[in-house]
Amino acid sequence: APRWPRRAWRRARRSTGVDSPRTAPSTSPRSAPRHITWTVGDAADTGLPPGSFDVAVSNMGIIFVEPLSQVAEVARLLKPAGVLAFSSWVRAQSNPLFDPVIAVLGAPTTTGFSPDQWGDDAVVADRLAPRFTDLQIERGEHRWEFASVDDAMTWLQNESPMHVATFARAGDARAPLADAFTAALRQHADPSGVVAFSSPYVVVSAVYRAS
């Protein structure tokens, strides 16, 4: 995924990171720069002081939170003319990191939103327009590469927070889900066994317009 959030953290004199309880174990404070203070909580209800941040940055994070409450919380936290910047995956016709979930477990329960909606320009504009201006959207492709199908499966089952949670809730379907992922990944393996494919993403930025 895009690495610009790390560059932003390094340039900031003081930063606060918010992680969800589900992914917090994968984000060790010991691996973060000393000027970053980590807290664990709800991204849509952080409890942090209002109007106290110049920039709010998220790398494939806030897209998983209910959007109306998330946008409202970001607006509450930013100072006037503060900047929101985040990345989102874009819906693609084929996605070996998600298609097996649909095939085995079925479509997610309808919640009124999906993470990749943030990859749609019209949706982004509609959600941010009431509180933000100077909207900019940049597009890119993230190349996934694993040494082998086995390495990719290790990442899916032990390292990717979203996929670890999916396997945990799969129950008796855990083995069929693993088989489906294995089959999908093999379609992207070259003769040497290396698995590689690309996923489209967007980087969105906007300026908070205080009322």
Image: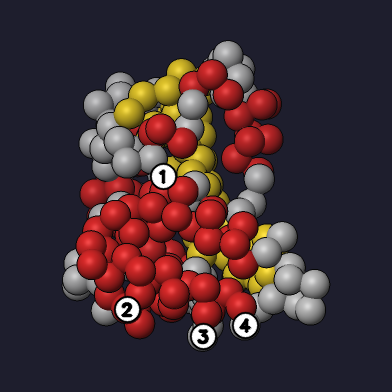
SS type, badge 4: loop
Marks 4 and 1, Cα distance to the nearest angstrom? 47 Å
Q: Earlier in the sequence, mark 4 or mark 1?
A: 4
- Given the current orientation, which residue lies at the most extreme right position? 192
Q: Is residue 11 above or below residue 88?
A: above
Type of residue at label 4? Gln
Residue identified by numbered label 1: 209
x 44%, y 74%: residue: 179
The amino acid sitting under disc 2 is Val
Q: Is residue 56 above or below residue 40?
A: below
The residue lying at 23 percent from left, 67 percent from top is 172
Q: Determine which residue is flagged by label 4.
A: 187
51 up-or-down from 44: above or below? above
| Label pair 3/4, CB-CB below 8 angstroms | no
Give the distance between the C-alpha atoms of the residues marked 2 and 4, in whole angstroms.
Answer: 17 Å
List x then y, in percent, for residue 183.
52, 80
Mark toward the viewer: 2 or 1: 2
> In terms of sequence position, does the residue under pointer 2 or pointer 1 come before the other?
2
Closer to the observer: label 3 or label 1?
3
- Marks 3 and 1 sit apart, C-alpha to C-alpha, by 36 Å
Category of crowding for the residue at label 3, using alpha-carbon neighbours closer than 10 angstroms: few (below 14), some (14–19), many (at least 20)? few
Q: Nearer the viewer, mark 3 or mark 2?
A: 2
From the top left corner, tell me how far across and down residue 92 is, in percent.
52, 79
Residue 207: x %, y % from top left = 50, 46
Q: Circle 2 is placed at which residue position? A: 104
| Tag 3 and tag 2, C-beta contact below 8 Å | no
Give the class, few, some or many, for how many residues have Cα within 10 Å of label 2's Cα (few <14, many ≥20).
Answer: some
**The disc labelled 3 sits on which kind of residue?**
Gln
Q: Under tag 1, what secondary structure?
A: loop
Identify residue for label 3: 93
Dot 3 falls on a residue whose secondary structure is loop
197, 168: nearer the viewer: 168
